[in-house]
């Protein structure tokens, strides 16, 4: 008589450890934390995709993200704080990166006339030209990344990520008590 034993998790590539997760009884492995998985996917994708940008124009992922957002913004220029919110780039890091891009002639920075302490950022003609050349490559690369997913997985991932993004701004996620 054979008894069937569950396969180890590593043998079950699609087994989702989140389905039965409960912080009080079965802690998640660090590698299974949602944020850890998202960071690893984002990092791997950026490294792969960046080779194209770096090779062609010497841009880092952060530089590309800032230039691309500015180039697509319908009402330039943009306040630095808004650019940071839209790109997810820390304000201090964005400031350093943008100063480097300004030295290269890809963006312009100036003080906001209406609000003295705020900085306004705009993409230059040269920066916009780079963005126009890279947008089709970036889009092809992003779509190629999604090819491993079924249509249902794409829809679930899109919906789930947007739901998480909205939830992160809500107080309920900030009320988790620290262990004493």
Image (spheres, rainbow, N blue to C red):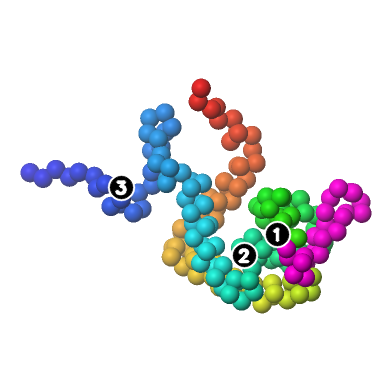
In the drawing, what numbered circle is on residue 9? 3
Residue 54: % across, % down: 60, 71
**Cα gap from disc 2 to disc 1, whole angstroms:** 9 Å
CB of mark 2 within 8 Å of CB of mark 1? yes
Question: In the image, residue 135 lies at what x, y percent?
Answer: 64, 72
Q: Name the residue under label 1.
A: 97
Q: Name the residue under label 2.
A: 60
Res. 89 in view: yes
Q: Where is residue 21 in the image (x, y as percent from the top left)?
A: 41, 37
Graded by Cα atoms within 10 Å as few (under 14), some (14 to 19) or many (20 or more), the crowding at tag 1 reads: some
Q: Which of marks 3 and 1 is nearer the N terminus?
A: 3
Q: Residue at x 74, y 70 (%)?
A: 104
Comparing marks 3 and 1, which lies closer to the viewer?
A: 1
The quadrant the N terminus occupies is top left
Give the image location of residue 121, x and y in percent: 80, 60
Q: Name which quarter of the figure residue 73 lies in.
A: bottom right
Q: Is residue 50 left or right of residue 4?
A: right
User: Contact, CB < 8 Å: mark 2 with mark 3?
Assistant: no
- Residue stretch in magenta: 100-123
- Residue 26's label in the rendered image is none
Which of discs 2 and 3 lies nearer the camera? The answer is 2
Q: Name the secondary structure under disc 1.
A: helix
| First in sequence: mark 2 vs mark 3 | 3
**Residue at 43% over, 32% down:** 23
């Amino acid at each position: 008589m054979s008894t069937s034993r569950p396969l180890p998790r590593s043998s079950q590539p699609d087994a989702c450890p989140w389905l039965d997760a409960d912080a009080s009884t079965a802690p998640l492995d660090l590698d299974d934390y949602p944020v850890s998985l998202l960071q690893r996917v984002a990092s791997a994708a950026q490294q792969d995709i960046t080779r194209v940008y770096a090779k062609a124009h010497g841009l880092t992922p952060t530089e590309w993200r800032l230039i691309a957002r500015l180039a697509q913004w319908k009402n330039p220029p943009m306040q630095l704080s808004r650019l940071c919110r839209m790109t997810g780039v820390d304000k201090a890091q964005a400031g350093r990166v943008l100063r480097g891009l300004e030295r290269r002639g890809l963006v312009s920075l100036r003080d906001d006339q209406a609000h003295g302490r705020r900085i306004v950022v705009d993409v230059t003609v040269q920066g916009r030209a780079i963005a126009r050349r890279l947008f089709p490559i970036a889009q092809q690369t992003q779509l190629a990344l999604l090819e491993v997913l079924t249509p249902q997985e794409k829809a679930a991932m899109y919906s789930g990520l947007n739901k998480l993004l909205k939830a992160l701004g809500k107080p309920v996620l900030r009320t988790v008590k620290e262990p004493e």
